[in-house]
Amino acid sequence: MELLGSTLTATYARPKVTATNFLPAISTMASSYKNRAPPYSPNYSMSLPWRPSTYYKVASISPGLAPLSNSAPAAVQTQMANYPSNRTALYARYTPDDWYKSNHIHYKDSESSRHSAERLRLDTARLIQFKDQQTRRSQSETSKNIGERVTDIAFWRSEINHETDQMIGETNALTDVKKRLERALAETEGPLQVAQECLYNREKRMAIDLVHDDVEKQLLKEVDCIKSCQERMRRHVDRATTQLLANRAAQHELERDINDKQSAFRIDEKCHQLRNTSDGIGYYRGVERLDATVSVPESWAKFSDDNILRSQSERIASAKLRDDIENLLNITSNELWNQFNIVNMAFTNRISEVADAKNKLQTHLAKTLQEIFQTEMTIEAIKKAIRNKEAPLKVAQTRLDERTRRPNVELCRDPAQLRLVNEVREIDETIQTLQQRLKDAEDALQMLLHTKATLEHDLGVKAHSLFIDQEKCMGMRKCFPSTPRLVGYT
């Protein structure tokens, strides 16, 4: 059955079955029927059914006298004029045509109403089916989107968790290296104090031994080397402290992002598991008009990606700093040990030189003492020789004096006289020579005594220098830190 004015493709009694669940748009059939229902108004009571005007319209025809037509027979008109009551009743009745027309109108109205109701019913069924499918499809797509969102959150959460674990491990490793560096820095204080104490002790050397020798030069280099190592270590400690702050800041951002994603994951997972039969679902009027979002998927992913990139960048910088610290510890340890060995070698050489000089001084002192003894013996021999010349001189002078008493011509300058004169002169010259030699011997003795005093003083200086270098300095330098301690272990 088709209604006039409808499309030929709209068949409602037996709808055509199609291979797909897609239904045509309802708007294409909206003009095929009329909505008899009145528009919704608050004045209508929802407890009473609405009444369509088709079935409940009150008749608006008022009964009255039907006018006689001019074509009525004259006998009828006369008869009706003669019977007023019948005339009145006659005027109140319809004609058979009116009766048939009324019935046909009712038939047509009934058929039109039924057709409209049938079209509306079938169209409503199709609308309900279409909207059900649309609702299920929309809910399925929404569930799929929420599921994808849960998967994305789980992925980024996994990535951030992995990066957080890596950052925690890197921070712990950098903290350990920093502690090793601080321990190594503390270990350098001992060698620095030893080197400075050695310099202070060597300032107590006396006299000629207070020289700017190779030991002092190497000690000064050792002090400079230790201070240079300490300065580099302090700079790396400051760098490690700054890097640890950056690592913890990046880790804090990752942990905050993890917490946010964990909360979002629980919420979206709960939303993904909600069904039409789930508990806790309800109406929240106007919630779709609220827009509390602060990001879009691109900026959301970029935020986590930026956090990961920042963490990776800080982790790379931290790893490079750890390598630098490891290299620094090895370099400083080697430098300290090399300079320590150089100073020890200089000390050894200097001690050997001082000991050799001391031994030579002792040898020369022994020889000087021997020479002093022999010089003293020579002086005594000279004095004795001078004393031994006094008697011959006296004899010769006495002879000459006695011979001056010879009388007259006997005072002859004979060979005896000449010999006595020469003898006296020889003895005088001998005594003068011996006295000069005695003076020279005494001068030599004084020089030897002075040399002896100088040697003894120099021996004392050398012994003092040996005590300082060998006992004090080398005694302190026996406790130099080991290589593991210089690189921060134990």
Image (spheres, grey):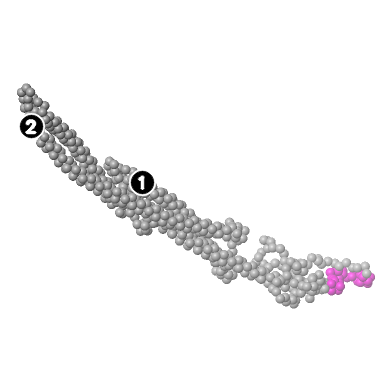
Q: Amino acid at mark 2?
A: Val
Q: What label sits on residue 132 in the rendered view? A: none
Residue 212, x across and y down, in percent? 33, 43
Q: What label sits on residue 395 in the rendered view? A: 2
Q: Amino acid at mark 1?
A: Lys
Residue 295, x across and y down, in percent? 59, 57
Q: With respect to residue 434, does 136 lie above or below?
A: below
- Judge whether residue 252 can be spotted in this image: no
Residue 133, x across and y down, in percent? 66, 71
Question: Which residue is depicted at the point 9% across and 34% down?
Answer: 392
Residue 442, x across and y down, in percent? 18, 36
Quarter of the image that includes the C terminus: bottom left
Question: Which residue is depicted at the point 71% across and 71% down?
Answer: 23
Mark 2 secondary-structure assignment: helix
User: Which residues, given as a range, are shown in magenta?
Assistant: 72-101
Mark 1 secondary-structure assignment: helix
Circle 2 residues within 10 Å: few <14, some 14–19, many ≥20? few
Comes first in the chain, label 2 or label 1? 1
Q: Label 1: which residue?
A: 217
Question: Which residue is depicted at the point 79% across and 71% down?
Answer: 7
Front-most of 8 and 191? 191
Residue 445 in which image quadrant = top left
Left or right of 359 in this view: 170: right
Front-most of 137 and 406? 406
